[in-house]
Amino acid sequence: MIQEDGTANGADFRLRPNRPDETGVSVNWLEAFDTDKAQQLAEVRRLYRLTVRRTGRFAELNIGAVREKVTEELATLRIVHDPLEADGDFEADHSHAEIDGLPPGDSPEADMIGDMIAECVINMHPAIEEP
């Protein structure tokens, strides 16, 4: 979600309260693709498993900055490489990772941590490549 001022909404970096089985926020590791930024993004778009809207955006984070900023408040935060195996119509995705150790999504702490992560967004990219 993008706020009116064009910045990322911290709610996107919280666990969803209606998904108690959820253990982390799904992300992709761009550097898993040994190529330039445009091709890295093309690979993420190709392998992404969720439906996105034409107006959707991918937020680019600097994980070092996220760790530095957030671990001051949340020592349990971890960014874990979590490759996905091929499944049905989906190819394997070796770039998949998760932000783990987050507080419950409906807590005030989750709001604060989500906002802190959102402050680390360095770029926004279209989720669907425009022709």
Image (cartoon, rainbow, N blue to C red):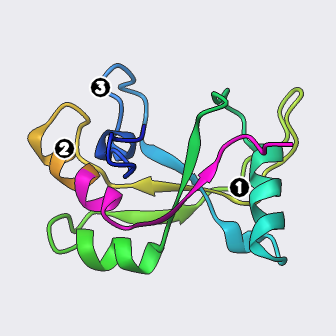
Quadrant for the C terminus, please. top right
Residue denoted by label 1: 83
Q: Position of residue 64 (x, y in %)?
A: 42, 80
Based on the picture, tell me whether residue 1 belongs to the magenta stretch: no
Q: Please say if 118 is above or below 79.
A: above
Quick check: 43 left or right of 6? right
Callout 2: few (<14), some (14-19), or many (20+) C-alpha neighbours within 10 Å?
A: some
Q: Position of residue 95 (x, y in %)?
A: 72, 60
User: Residue 60 versus residue 34: which sits nearer the camera?
Assistant: 60
Residue denoted by label 2: 111
Quarter-of-image position of residue 104: top left
Quarter-of-image position of residue 107: top left
Residue found 14% across the figure and 67% down from its top: 73
Residue found 67% across the figure and 30% down from its top: 54
Element on which disc 2 rests: helix
Point out the stretch of residues depicted in magenta.
115-131
Residue denoted by label 3: 17
Element on which disc 1 rests: loop
Callout 3: few (<14), some (14-19), or many (20+) C-alpha neighbours within 10 Å?
A: few
Q: Nearer the viewer, mark 2 or mark 1?
A: 2
First in residue order: circle 2 vs circle 1: 1
Q: Position of residue 126 (x, y in %)?
A: 65, 47
Distance between the Cα atoms at labels 3 and 2? 12 Å
Distance between the Cα atoms at labels 3 and 1? 24 Å
Q: Work out which residue is located at the far top of the displayed protein and give it.
A: 18
Element on which disc 3 rests: loop
Q: Position of residue 85 (x, y in %)?
A: 80, 45
